[in-house]
Amino acid sequence: MEKDRGNRKVRSGVVVSDAMDKTVVVRVERLFKHPVYKKYIRRHKKFMAHDEQNQCRVGDKVQIVESRPYSKSKCWRVQSVIEKTTEVR
């Protein structure tokens, strides 16, 4: 049981790189409505996340949660794997 440490940001996205040790790059997409034209726009951002067991592969859908800084560019960690990819590399 994890202690309650306040509200942490949670995002879900797709793993786009797993080349590093204990680190994955997760692409998170979001949809928002344009303020003038009212059309939906798709934007994405890539986050580096800590993957302790090296369990994530490219194409997996994962849920990441905000955490302490693990390195200069890595302050998220993989909370769970939502869907594993069936593609074989």
Image: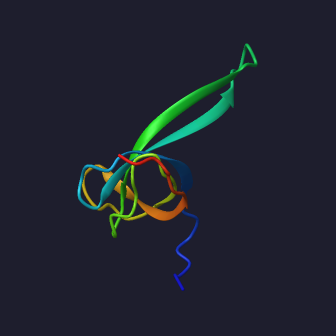
Q: Quadrant of the N terminus?
A: bottom right
Left or right, 1 with reference to 32: left
Give the color scheme: rainbow, by chain, secondary structure or one colour: rainbow
> Residue 74: where, in percent of width, then height?
32, 54
Residue 86 drawn above or below residue 6: above
Q: Residue at x 52, y 74 (%)?
A: 5
Q: Residue at x 55, y 29 (%)?
A: 43
Along the viewing direction, whichever of 7 and 82 lies nearer the viewer: 82
Q: Check the image and name the residue furthest to the right.
A: 38
Q: Residue at x 56, y 70 (%)?
A: 6
Q: Check the image and name the residue furthest to the top.
A: 37
> Residue 72: where, in percent of width, then height?
25, 52
> Residue 21: where, in percent of width, then height?
23, 59
Q: Residue at x 36, y 63 (%)?
A: 51
Q: Check the image and name the residue furthest to the front.
A: 88
Left or right, 51 with reference to 2: left
> Residue 84: where, in percent of width, then height?
51, 56
User: Exactly how many numbered labels are in the figure?
Assistant: 0
Residue 54 drawn above or below residue 25: below
Along the viewing direction, whichever of 53 and 87 lies nearer the viewer: 87
Left or right, 57 with reference to 84: left
Quadrant position of residue 33: top right
